[in-house]
Amino acid sequence: MKYKDEKYEKAERGSTKILPKTVLLILLCGLSFYLGGLYCGNNKLEVNNVAKAGSSLDVDNSPQANSVSFPECSSDYQDYTPCTDPRKWKKYGTHRLTFMERHCPPVFDRKQCLVPPPNGYKSPIRWPKSKNECWYRNVPYDWINKQKSNQHWLKKEGEKFIFPGGGTMFPNGVSAYVDLMQDLIPEMKDGTIRTAIDTGCGVASWGGDLLDRGILTVSLAPRDNHEAQVQFALERGIPAILGIISTQRLPFPSNSFDMAHCSRCLIPWTEFGGVYLLEIHRILRPGGFWVLSGPPVNYENRWKGWDTTVEEQRSNYEKLQDLLSSMCFKLYAKKDDIAVWQKSSDNMCYNKLSNDPDAYPPKCDDSLEPDSAWYTPLRPCVVVPSAKLKKTDLESTPKWPERLHSTPERVSDVPGGNGGLFKRDSSKWKTRAKHYKKLLPAIGSDKIRNVMDMNTAYGGLAAALVDDPLWVMNVVSSYAANTLSVVFDRGLIGTYHDWCEAFSTYPRTYDLLHVDGLFTSESQRCEMKYVMLEMDRILRPNGYAIIRESTYFADTIASVAKGLRWSCRKEQTESESENEKLLVCQKKLWYSSETK
């Protein structure tokens, strides 16, 4: 099976874990004993100024603030992706490209070293100029340049890669392609469609063009041995993650995206019981749109260029149309190489599946929760939208930007969640974001483009920064309450993740990482040094981290940060709480000693 030039990821979500305060206190005491033994000593941590603003505090000279250090990884690890490592692919099966799914190293095999940048690495070109060009030395891959030169994905000019906006299915440029798509889907123009996913994204030119039209896209492609397509996307400042539809669900809740797109991604949609298209159905909002360009669309005029016969392509198109109809999609529009289907928002269609014992694909039973999406196997059945949710379909969802601040219906599905709590959370993050900008004036400037909120609740920080020239990847812990559906209902994007493992991205892909209580909530499961090594891996040189933690953890975090070659300062929170502190850190640019 093939995806766009061998492309695609996997996922799942675990159950909610809420520890009683007493148990948590015992665990913290145990951790205190462990960390005390690990870091005891008399060395005082050196704290440097980072984007000096406000009055910084010295880090306490506590036993837990003893400095640590990490060696450099060898230069051949400059693009190391621990859970999707091509070095390990031979250990896993080729069936349905399972080797490209997440396979994280065991604890004894984890790297405890700093991933170096490529020789000659420069600070990335700033947005919006970066959408059309990037430094060659930052993503030094001639293979994709030579392989895709005839499709105008990118071209090398001097010290830069240039992105002309071409693609297999849009020879006249991505903007002309999206213009045609907008003619077919007027909802792309009026704020109805806000979130999209591009499966098999190439270098993410489609997602980049949609940003100018107010549509926020998650571009998805697998870890490639040569192509580094997701790395190109993030280097350009376009949202993207490593991912593949193979045997596991994608790391998103059900009914999330307003639109899904596949441009000649070569996914065999009708094979294996239609599981790949069933997964698109699961994550697509009722009333949402699925857009396909490439085989078998327009087979009447295109079949000669596809190394096939017109009869075979006609059969493929008919199979696809039958499969879509059986899972309650209707053909919405079709012109030239683009076909658009719309997912039904009427549950009467799904009731027919329940009443027909021979229906295929069948309706899923209740044993698999619709939002479970972290290492959750794909199954060939239809996930039926909940009948109790009356306002999650695309037509009932407020248009952008109104939906950003409207209380989503699914907030009531979160334990303890309600409209009042949602409004208070939004207000709280407006205050916090204002304080962050005083401490780190780079926020809101062209110095920060790719941002990750590593353990969000409702996407409050992303909402507070929505008018700045940046985008935020909202991460919800696979062990926390499921709030990610609320994030998507607001018109924001995000993913499930377990921070005891590596994130699905290349090194050097984020300008700012934000942490709010992650170490406090996950310390009983994740060893702090591995989490911070992962933060260092995905943070760009000269990038920033804002770490909001309990006073108990702050000094230990700062000592590990020093071992990462970060410069940090401790700051008061906006409320000047004695129980919580802020660390404002910056990662230094350094080069491998092997290249000196």
Image (tube, grey):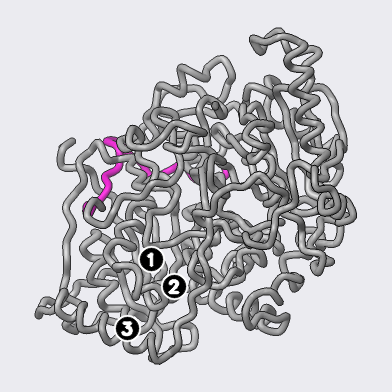
* Front in this rendered view, residue 120 or 111: 111
Disc 1 residue type (three-letter):
Ala
Q: Which residues are magenta?
A: 111-130
Relative to 493, is 322 above or below? above
For the point 44% across and 59% down, which residue is it?
512
Disc 3 residue type (three-letter):
Leu
Give the labeled residue for mark 1. Answer: 51
* Precedes in sequence: disc 1 or disc 3: 3
Is 358 left or right of 165, judged from the image as shown?
A: right
The picture places residue 576, in percent across and down from the top left corner, at 44, 88
**Residue 220 can be seen, yes or no:** yes
Q: Are marks 2 and 1 in contact (CB under 8 Å)?
A: yes
* Majority secondary structure in the magenta region: loop
Residue neighbourhood size for the residue with mark 3, other residues' Cα within 10 Å, grouped as few (<14), some (14–19), many (≥20): some
For the point 72% across and 70% down, which residue is it?
410
For the point 24% across and 59% down, which residue is it?
565
Disc 2 element: helix
Q: CA distance from mark 2 to mark 1?
A: 7 Å
Q: CA distance from mark 3 to mark 2?
A: 33 Å
Is 196 left or right of 593, judged from the image as shown?
A: right
Q: Are marks 1 and 3 in contact (CB under 8 Å)?
A: no
Whether residue 149 appears in magenta in the rendering, the answer is: no
The picture places residue 34, in percent across and down from the top left corner, at 20, 78
Residue neighbourhood size for the residue with mark 1, other residues' Cα within 10 Å, grouped as few (<14), some (14–19), many (≥20): some
Disc number placed over residue 439 in the picture, else none: 2
